[in-house]
Image: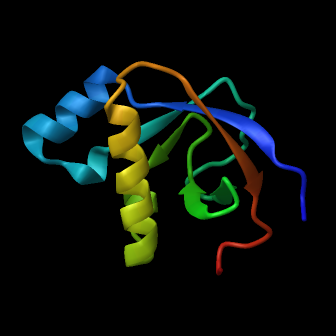
Amino acid sequence: MKKMQEIVFKVTANSLKQVQKEDKWHQAQIAIVGTGFQATSVKRQEIIIGGVIKLIVGDSHAIWHSHNIISERQKKDFESLFSLLANHPDKNVSFLYEISDNLDD
């Protein structure tokens, strides 16, 4: 098992307003605060949060809902994490994570 590292997320008030006001889940994003991810829309990475929650990162600064609709489980995990963070907009919240070896699992 790989050693887990710390990652910091937040949902910004602006992102939350857009999702609530326009019901545009595809625009929902969880901001990644201060990390050196090299993910892009072409070179996506799967991360495992807390050893359980698998999400796709396709941007070096955010995790987008639109990248996490591969499975119903992944979609629900994204929406649950977004909702948890949205209870505290603009607040940084730390989690432990590891980078997955593949995107297929």
Residue drawn 68% across and 36% down?
A: 7
Q: Is residue 83 above or below residue 14?
A: below
Residue closest to the eye, 86 or 103? 86
Residue drawn 38% across and 41% down?
A: 84
Count of picture labels? 0
Residue closest to the eye, 102 or 84? 84
Q: Is residue 17 above or below residue 59?
A: above
Estimate the x, y position of residue 17 in percent, counting from the top left: 19, 29
Q: Is residue 47 left or right of residue 66?
A: right
Estimate the x, y position of residue 83 in percent, counting from the top left: 32, 43
Q: Is residue 25 above or below residue 15?
A: below
Estimate the x, y position of residue 60 in percent, counting from the top left: 62, 38
Estimate the x, y position of residue 22 in percent, counting from the top left: 9, 41
Q: Is residue 28 visible?
A: yes
| Quarter of the figure with residue 56 | bottom right
Please state, as top left, top right, bottom left or bottom right, where the C terminus lies in the image: bottom right
Residue closest to the eye, 29 or 96? 96
Kindly give the residue lying farthest to the left in the view shown. 21
| Quarter of the figure with residue 47 | bottom right
Q: Is residue 5 left or right of residue 8?
A: right
Q: How is the image coloured?
A: rainbow
Residue drawn 19% across and 34% down?
A: 18
Q: Is residue 31 above or below residue 91?
A: below
Please state, as top left, top right, bottom left or bottom right, where the N terminus lies in the image: bottom right
Residue drawn 44% across and 61% down?
A: 77
Q: Is residue 43 visible?
A: no
Residue closest to the eye, 45 or 42? 45
